[in-house]
Amino acid sequence: MNQKLWKRPVFVGSALMALTLAVATPASAATKHPTAPLSVHAVAGNAKANVNWSKPSSNGGSPIMKYVATSHPDNKTCMTAKTKCTISGLSNGASYTFTVVAKNRAGAGPSSKSSNKVTPTNSSTLSFTDESGNPYNVAVFPLIDPAKGAQDATPNAGDRFVAVLFKITDTGKNQISDDANINASIIGSNDETYTNDFDDVTECTNFNGGDYALDPKQSALGCVVFQLPNAVNVKRVEWAPNGGFGGRFGEWNA
């Protein structure tokens, strides 16, 4: 009798465990892998490439935890929770494409389609396209740091003017136009972003109030002025076509 009473709870416990597993299984199966990231685009830099993309059409029912971008060839990678990152350690003069995968708690989804082909270079000139797809180049010259304010312009207390001189060249077959004041920014040694200050300096001119309009093969030279705290150095200069709405960006280390 005692033996029967001892066995029965074991049977019931096993049945309850089986029921628990049966109920839990559909919940874990509800999470699927995310689909592939979309619209992968790359911009070459010096021994590196800036890669950006759009979110997958489906996250598989679970938030995206991270993305992994990979270079082809060399399999260099960068990981981020954002939709852009920089892959370093590339060979200047070699051609690369890039793919991206998204990962959620179920694991990695399929690879994206390959990006455009880019060739890293140690040149100060980077290539971009405007919102209509017209190509153009932007070259950066050594920083003017500090710069002297024109027309009695003075920086705020504890700040200084820094001017970045750009040469913009229309390399396509159509006219291009944009606003350098909106496209250019500086990243400081404190990792803060600094945007155009709209002041003038004596060393260079701000295009036409930041605006430029170029015919094919034509170039324009001008600068964008910033205010930085005296204790902050320039870490890098960034250029984001169409005020950053184009989704394609480039950078130069200071």
Image (spheres, grey):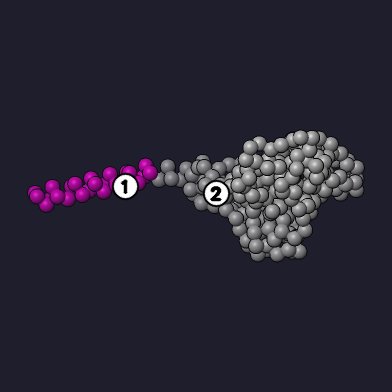
Residue that label 1 marks: 18
Residue occupying the point 27% across, 46% down: 15
Residue 49 in the image: x percent, y percent?
69, 55
Task: Tell me which secondary structure the magenta stretch mostly adopts.
Answer: helix
Residue occupying the point 80% across, 39% down: 206
Residue occupying the point 29% across, 47% down: 17
Label 2 with label 1: CB-CB less than 8 Å? no
Which of these two is toward me, 151 or 6?
Answer: 151
Callout 1: SS = helix
Q: Look at the image and tell me whether residue 175 can be seen.
A: yes
Which of these two is toward me, 33 or 238?
Answer: 238
What range is drawn magenta here? Answer: 1-24
Q: Look at the image and tell me whether residue 246 can be seen.
A: no
Give the label, 2 or 1, closer to the camera: 2
- How far is the residue under mark 2 from the one under mark 1? 35 Å
Residue 175 in the image: x percent, y percent?
88, 40
| 13 drawn magenta | yes
Q: Is residue 56 above or below residue 118?
A: above
Could you tell me the amino acid type at mark 1?
Ala
